[in-house]
Every structure is written in structure tokens, then in C-alpha cells.
Amino acid sequence: MQKPVLHTLLSPRLLDLYDVDNSIVVIIDVFRATSTIATALYNGAEKVVPVAGVEDCIAIGKKLEAVTAGERDGKIIKGLQHGNSPAEYFREFIEGKTLVLTTTNGTRLLHMALDKGASEVVTGSFPNLSAVSEHLIASKKNVILGCSAWKDRFNLEDTLFAGAVISRIKEHFTIHCDSSLMAEDMYNLHGNNMYAFIRKLTHWHRLSAFGLEKDLEYCVTPNVANVLPVYKDGALVAG
Amino acid sequence: MQKPVLHTLLSPRLLDLYDVDNSIVVIIDVFRATSTIATALYNGAEKVVPVAGVEDCIAIGKKLEAVTAGERDGKIIKGLQHGNSPAEYFREFIEGKTLVLTTTNGTRLLHMALDKGASEVVTGSFPNLSAVSEHLIASKKNVILGCSAWKDRFNLEDTLFAGAVISRIKEHFTIHCDSSLMAEDMYNLHGNNMYAFIRKLTHWHRLSAFGLEKDLEYCVTPNVANVLPVYKDGALVAG
């Protein structure tokens, strides 16, 4: 039997170069949207509704009687209740609740993938690395590892997660894709030293100014919220 | 004095994310446009006129009484005289002549950079690695290392050249750019083993089907055609 094909997308801007409608798209936004989504669902949130804009976040939050969350430049957006930190979504707070979340990059790529007819959308981050990897192997479908990037610019934290997935699942896929080759090399080079390496990244400098060092370290720690967020009927739910 | 800023562009599709009009843009198309341009100029071509389309290539070639060249899918385009291989442009043939060249990726990025008002456009490839690196240090201007990619998809051969340049000039620039960090890491990982590594790349499989292995090895050999192609009055000339 022929193996399914895997590609790595390095920027949302390049999405139309790939065969989205025949693929599972893994939305990756390591700092911090997809790490937060995994954490909220792992800690018992009923669902997470990813929305593109602040007004939608407020309106849907009211309608669903949900927790609303979103940040811009490291501060909670006016009119919303919570931020983008996974640390906010501990079990005692989030269990049984719905979270409506707006973020700069991850939410946007997720909606782009849906608009282009992705056959399935899941979210990935180090906290749920194994759950994602095992699901992709079991599905036997084509895969796009979709890095959310930063305002369309390449970033390394999302790429390193793509590399971590590739290193775990590559025997099950056909991979002829320089982006994937690079992602795996970068993960092999830095995967054992992530806490130190992330301090070199552009996004680290952007977020650490807001005192989020512990948050960012959590976001590159494998399997501490090992659940599979699957998009279904307008929300991400534990698969 | 503040150091100038260096960025690496991974796909032409992302060009507008960078401050093109305050930068020297280095056009990189390792397989094979910019390797061929360096080789032709090194071997005494008067100039190389990069054109976007085949019709322009024929018309301008006739007007300038020039050599016309271009390939698609590894074959010389109907109506043109020569291909994209650097091996075709040895001194006895090209000295004193004008070459009008159309290619899939490099030519296109070059015209995009001009359209966006780049303050200077030069071309880079391993055969002229030192000439480019020394020019960038001496210029003391902001730099965009522009990978031409393959139909907008990321490729590693252009990225490795960007990494080679960065490893030589980084002390002279401010670099806060994950693309550049990645490019340098990839070059440090594979720079000593390029002939073997290029056999893993997507583009190798595309071109080696046409029997171009020796060509591709030449294209990753440093400083064998060490000239600086600078865009001036519609053509690339030895700077």
C-alpha cells in the first residue's frame, strides 16, 4: 500500500500551495494558542471555540455563557476576561466550561484551513505531542503540519514542533519536502536542549518582555497535556 | 554605530513582509540561475539580462544580438538557443557577449525586488560566495538574503547559501530573525558535506532526472566563479 504524504507549511501565506482538501491539517501555534487549547481540554474544558476577532469573541462568549480569552501585545484584550496563558486554565477553573479564544496567528490559520476545505483539523503543540503523533499514524491520511508563524513570518518554535512530530511518525509517510527535512534536522539539533534554545528565538524576545518565561518553557514541554483537540461543529473538543 | 539589519526571505511570497526599499536584496537561486549568472560574468560575459518571460527573451535577444537562454523541465525552451547550465557558459563561448536569460524562480524574484524598490540588487550563489559576502560587509546597509525557492515553496539549497553568507558576515549585522538563525544552523550542519546532502533535496530529484548531477555539484562549490553580479540599467554586470 502506498504511504500517505506529509508536508510542512512554514507560513499561512503558503497554504494554497498544498493539497489542503485531501489532508488532515495540524494547526501549530506553540507560543501559545495551541498549547493553551491542549491544556484547557486536558483539564476538562467542554470545548474551545477559536474565533478570529474580538467582537466575535465577546458575542459568542455571551451566547454560550463561556469564558472569553485573548491578548494583544501580552495584555488581556479589553472586553475579554482572560489571557492566552495555559497556566490560567487549570482544572479547578476550566473543567466543564466552554472557552472562546481569539489569538493573532493560530486562530487565523485554523480558519484558513477550514475555508480551504481541510478534511480534518486538529491542533498540535509540545504539551500534546504524543496524542497528535499517534493520531496521524492511525489515520493513514495525507498530513499538512501547519506552522502558524508570526504575522506570516517563519518562526522556529512551530517548526521545531513539526520536526518533533516528523521524527516520531516519518516511517509511516512519504516525505519529499524540504520544509519537513529542515524541520526534522532542527528538532534533532535542538530537541534535547529546548529550554536553552528558545531563549534565542524572536518570539522569546517579544513575549519574555511580559514576564512569560515559565509559560514559554511549559509550551515546549512534551506530553504534559496529552489530549487530541479535534475541530467539530465549530469547536475544538477532546478527540 | 548601530549595525545594519539582516533578514532571510524564505519564499518570494513573503517579500512584502520586509523593508525592501531600504535594503540590498541578494537574489539566490542556487539550482541554477544565479550560479549560471556568476559563471557567465566570471567568464567574461559583458552582461546578463534577466527577463521574466520567453517572448521577452526572444525579442530582447534579437535587439541586443545576444545569446538567449532558458529551460523548462530540463529542456531548452523552443525559440531560445541555450539552457540554464553554468557549464554552457565557458570563456571561449561567452566572453564579450550578452546573455539574455529566463528562469522559473530567480528571474521572477529579481523583478519583484526591483518592483518593490530595492535600493540595490545583486545575485548570489556558492560559486560567488566570497564576493557577495565581502560586498555586504563593505556596504554597511541593511540586507535581505532572498531565497528564490521553487514556485514559492521553501527549498534548502537557497537556504544553505543564505546560511553560508550569514556564517561569514554575522558579526557585522544585527540579526533578529528566525529564518536566519535556521539558515545558519542548517549550513553549519551540512556545509562540510554538501555533495552528499544535496542528494536528499526535492530539487535534486527534480533535476537529476535530466542527468544534471555534475551541474548541481558545481552549483554548491564555493568561489569557483567569484565575481559580484550587480543589477544596473536593466542588466547584471560584474561589480
Image (cartoon, coloured by chain):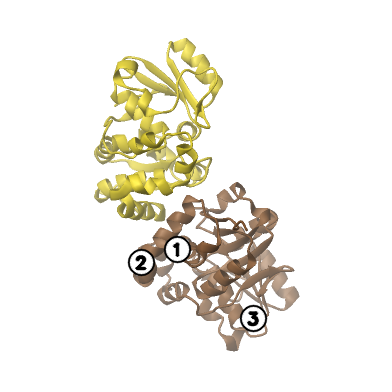
Chain colours: A yellow, B brown
Residue B45, label in figure: 3
Q: Is residue A120 visible?
A: no
Compared with A226, A100 (above or below) is: above
- The residue that appears at 51% across and 75% down in the rendered structure is B127
Callout 2: chain: B
Residue A18: x and y in percent read 45, 45
- Residue at the disc numbered 1: B160
CA–CA distance between discs 2 and 1? Answer: 11 Å
User: Pointer 2 and pointer 1: residues touching (CB < 8 Å)?
Assistant: yes
In the image, A186 versus B115, the foreground residue is A186
The N terminus of chain B, quarter of image:
bottom right
Q: Is residue B20 left or right of residue A165?
A: right
Residue B14: x and y in percent read 56, 49
User: Pointer 2 and pointer 3: residues touching (CB < 8 Å)?
Assistant: no
- Residue at the disc numbered 2: B197
Q: Is residue B142 left or right of residue A206?
A: right
Compared with A12, A96 (above or below) is: above
Residue type indicated by callout 2:
Phe
In the image, A131 versus A112, the foreground residue is A131
Looking at marks 3 and 1 on the same chain, the residue that comes earlier in the sequence is marked by 3
Q: Quadrant of residue A228?
A: top left
Same chain shared by disc 2 and disc 1: yes
Which element carries disc 1, helix, strand or loop? Answer: helix
The C terminus of chain B, quarter of image:
bottom right
Looking at marks 2 and 3 on the same chain, the residue that comes earlier in the sequence is marked by 3
Nearer to us of marks 3 and 1 is: 1
Residue A87: x and y in percent read 36, 27
